[in-house]
Image (cartoon, rainbow, N blue to C red):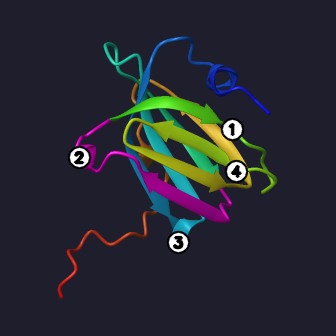
Amino acid sequence: MSDWKDDYNLLGLGGLTSLITKVKVSLWGNEVLIECVYNPEERLPYLLTFKDCRNISWTVHDEDEVGEPEAEFFGIALGEPEHRKPAVITTDIFEISILYGSLRIHKGEKLNSEDLETEVLVSQAQAVL
């Protein structure tokens, strides 16, 4: 079983803290983009892109914090691609488990998810009851 700290180090970020700023689910759950910043003082952006996703499991740990704009990245277990073992990302607010086909990390000063030409298929409209 892999160590969470070792898997975080495999992302090539170093030893400083990361924050998750946004999670986007698109293509009806087949793609998950997790927008992050490394080193909160310098705010260096990076993006984790999970493609060919087959199962996403989400647990909220702290309901009082769901309105916060950022979640502190506690750890990641990368799992195994080709749907063999899910990646698990844990934060101070939530934990997400993603059974995926492939994973890529994108780093860059001006990186944002729109650069990746991903169409988000989640409606922004409020539900009317």
- Tell me if residue 117 is in the magenta stretch: no
Q: Nearer the viewer, mark 2 or mark 4?
A: 2
Query: What percent of the width, then of the height, locates residue 39?
Result: 40, 16
The magenta stretch spans which residues?
Answer: 51-70
Secondary structure at badge 1 equals loop
Is the N terminus in the top left, top right, bottom left or bottom right quadrant? top right
Callout 3, which amino acid?
A: Trp
Of mark 4 and mark 3, the one earlier in the sequence is 3
Residue 106 x, y percent position in the rendering: 56, 34
| Residue located beneath label 2 in the image | 64
Residue at the spot of label 4: 86
Membership of 61 in magenta stretch: yes
**Image quadrant where residue 69 sits:** top left
Q: Residue at x 70, y 50 (%)?
A: 86
User: Secondary structure beneath disc 2?
Assistant: helix
**Viewer-nearest of labels 3 and 2?**
2
| Amino acid marked by disc 2 | Asp
Q: Disc 1 or 3, which lies upstream in sequence?
A: 3
Q: Which residue is mark 1?
A: 78
Q: Are marks 2 and 1 in contact (CB under 8 Å)?
A: no
Residue drawn at 66 percent across, 45 percent down = 87
Q: Earlier in the sequence, mark 3 or mark 2?
A: 3
Q: Residue at x 52, y 72 (%)?
A: 28
